[in-house]
Image (cartoon, rainbow, N blue to C red):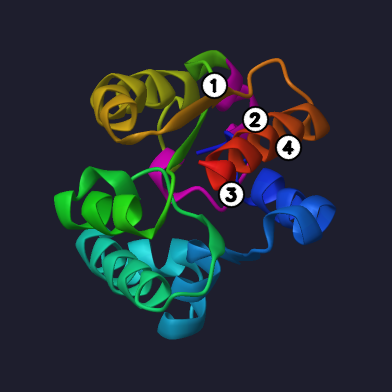
Amino acid sequence: MGSGKSTIGRQLVEQFAARIRMVFVDLDEVIVDKAGKSISRIFEEDGECVFRALESEGLEMLTADSESKVIATGGGTVLSAPNRERMKKAGPVIWLDASPEVLAARTANDPNRPLLKGVDPLQKARELDRQRRPVYKACADFRVDTSLLSVDEAVEEIAGFLSEYADE
């Protein structure tokens, strides 16, 4: 949450479309389209379990075909073992990492972050980091620390990795 998945993924595809030949899909947008309501409303009205089920269904749909995609998943998508398996089968998994302090600063005033509703953003970022970091580390094929990188710098690092990956 706040590492730059949607922004960096979208720019990666726009900037290097000819080189990496992929389309960009934001899993959160797929969930919103399917549910017919915002993620915040899904959390409020249906709960996180329903959101996670929609997330898994959306990921399954996106990875079912052979079209090459850059998929921006939510930070919790990787917590499900079946989701990790789908992601690994679909292609390289890139982890956009950032310190909890940076993530909290980026997301603190965003009302569209249901996991931050009514909590201290830094405390929540540290909690999520402790819970998720081992899973991200185990699943990722490539890690980019976006804490101090511009979007362009992060995109360049990822494009370089994908070019090398495609050449293998």
The residue under label 1 is 98
Q: Earlier in the sequence, mark 3 or mark 1?
A: 1
Mark 1 and mark 4: Cα distance apart in space: 15 Å
Examine the structure image and report whether residue 110 is included in the region drawn in magenta: yes
Secondary structure state at the residue bearing disc 4:
helix
Expressed as whole percent of the image width and height from the top left, the position of residue 25 reads 58, 66
Task: Look at 70% across and 47% down and name the residue there.
Answer: 7
The residues colored magenta run: 102-116
Q: Is residue 109 visible?
A: no
Secondary structure state at the residue bearing disc 3:
loop
Q: Considering the whole magenta stretch, tell me its main secondary structure.
A: helix
Q: Earlier in the sequence, mark 3 or mark 2?
A: 2
The residue under label 4 is 155
> In this rendering, which labeled residue sits more in front, label 3 or label 1?
1
Image quadrant assignment for residue 164 = top right
Q: Earlier in the sequence, mark 1 or mark 4?
A: 1
Q: Earlier in the sequence, mark 3 or mark 4?
A: 3
Expressed as whole percent of the image width and height from the top left, the position of residue 67 reads 52, 74
> In this rendering, which labeled residue sits more in front, label 4 or label 2?
4
